[in-house]
Amino acid sequence: MSSPNLEIVICMGSSCFSRGNKKTLPLIQEYLKEKGLESHVLFKGSHCFGECENGPILKIGDSIYRKVDSSNVQDILEQELVGLNTH
């Protein structure tokens, strides 16, 4: 089995978690499952990124997204994961 092509890290620090990542977490899991990307993306939680005032935080590859919530997470995922090599 090959290693994942991309890493997604969601902040699970108390501020980000309570401000929206609690709801965003299952949305990302569902998106990856629906698109068949689970084996191509390493999705994991992390402790604080140190940007609580800009949270909730999501990191995809080298990009950090601030103020992520259920209304914008799908657009972020589609932008980042378009053309992801799944072969």
Image: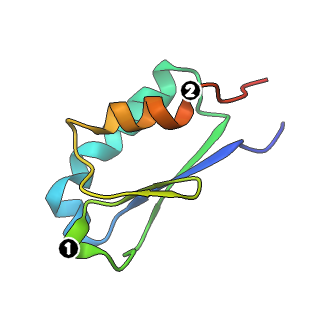
Direction bottom: furthest residue: 50
> Is residue 65 depicted above or below 32 in this figure?
below
Residue toward you, 85 or 2: 85
**Residue type at mark 1?**
Glu
Q: Where does label 1 land, which residue? A: 53
Local secondary structure at mark 2: loop
Q: Residue furthest right?
A: 1
Residue beneath the point at 37% across and 75% down: 48
Total marks placed: 2
Q: Position of residue 10 (x, y in %)?
A: 41, 57
Judging depth in this view, the residue of 16 and 51 nearest the camera is 51
x and y percentages locating residue 84 in the rendered image: 65, 30
Q: Which residue is mark 2?
A: 82
Q: Residue at x 40, y 29 (%)?
A: 30
Viewport quadrant of the C terminus:
top right
Could you say where residue 49 lies in the image, as x and y percent from the top left? 40, 74
Where is residue 33 drawn, in percent x and y? 49, 25
Q: Secondary structure at mark 1?
A: helix
- Left or right, 82 with respect to 79, comes to right
